[in-house]
Image (spheres, rainbow, N blue to C red):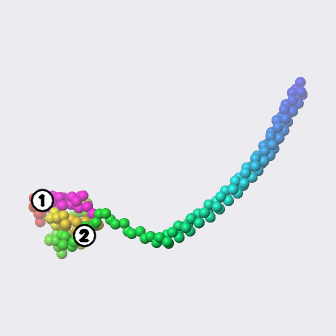
């Protein structure tokens, strides 16, 4: 009985192995045929696309030539767009009264919110060293300064005039320490 059982087991294993090999071979052959069919379909499709692309390119070049001809014929030069809002003319008469040098010690203009070291140096170069000079600015002076600081509207936006007026009041109310 053990001999019969052993023979059946061997036959089953042989059938299993042989089925696996035959299936693997058939799978390889069928995929190879499917790949060949796909490649031939893609090549025929590409051939059609290639012809279509060539036709479109020739049409495009014809259109480009026509556009160039029309541009030469019309010779249109587009004028520069005019600004709807004219820039105000800044007059040098609007310049705040500059000082050649500070009267005594120059005020620390960096205490004013919006004035940093670079703007303080620019203001000093323009002859503004003290808080009272900024506090006394009128609208024309502010326009002139905005133009020269290259920050339009900054003086008004950050309220330099009001801040410096407060700083002037503080310096008047506090006695100077020697």
Give the class, few, some or many, for how many residues have Cα within 10 Å of label 1's Cα (few <14, many ≥20).
Answer: few
Helix, strand or loop at label 2? It is: loop
In the picture, which quadrant includes the C terminus?
Answer: bottom left
Let me know if residue 167 is in the magenta part.
yes
The residue lying at 87 percent from left, 33 percent from top is: 11
Quadrant of residue 139 in the image? bottom left
**Residue at mark 2:** 89
Helix, strand or loop at label 1? It is: helix
Please state which of residues 97 and 177 is positioned toward the viewer in this rendering: 97
Left or right: 27, with 125 as reference point: right
Quadrant of residue 130 in the image? bottom left
Q: Which mark sits nearer the N-terminus, 1 or 2?
A: 2
Quadrant of residue 25 in the image? top right
Mark 1 and mark 2 in contact? Answer it, CB < 8 Å. no
Considering every residue shown, the one lying at the far top of the view is 1
The residue lying at 80 percent from left, 46 percent from top is: 29
Where is residue 118 shown, x and y percent of the image?
28, 67
Q: Is residue 47 visible?
A: yes
In the picture, which quadrant includes the N terminus?
Answer: top right
Between the C-alphas of marks 1 and 2, the distance is 34 Å
Extent of the magenta region: 151-171
Where is residue 65 shown, x and y percent of the image?
56, 68
Please state which of residues 49 and 11 is positioned toward the viewer in this rendering: 49
**Residue at mark 1:** 169
Considering every residue shown, the one lying at the far bottom of the view is 100
């Amino acid at each position: 009985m053990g001999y019969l059982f052993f023979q059946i087991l061997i036959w089953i294993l042989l059938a299993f192995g042989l089925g696996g090999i035959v299936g693997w071979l058939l799978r390889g052959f069928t995929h190879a045929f499917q790949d060949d069919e796909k490649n031939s379909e893609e090549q025929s499709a590409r051939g059609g696309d290639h012809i279509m692309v060539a036709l479109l390119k020739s049409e495009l070049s014809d259109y480009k030539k026509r556009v160039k001809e029309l541009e030469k014929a019309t010779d249109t030069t587009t004028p520069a767009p005019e600004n709807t809002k004219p820039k105000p003319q800044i007059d040098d008469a609007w310049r705040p009264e500059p000082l050649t040098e500070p009267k005594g010690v120059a005020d620390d203009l960096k205490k004013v919110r919006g004035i940093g070291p670079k703007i303080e140096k620019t203001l000093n170069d323009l002859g503004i060293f003290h808080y009272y000079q900024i506090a006394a600015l009128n609208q024309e002076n502010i326009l002139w300064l905005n133009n020269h600081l290259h920050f339009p509207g900054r003086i008004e936006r950050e309220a330099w005039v009001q801040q410096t007026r407060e700083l002037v009041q503080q310096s008047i109310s506090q006695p100077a320490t020697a």
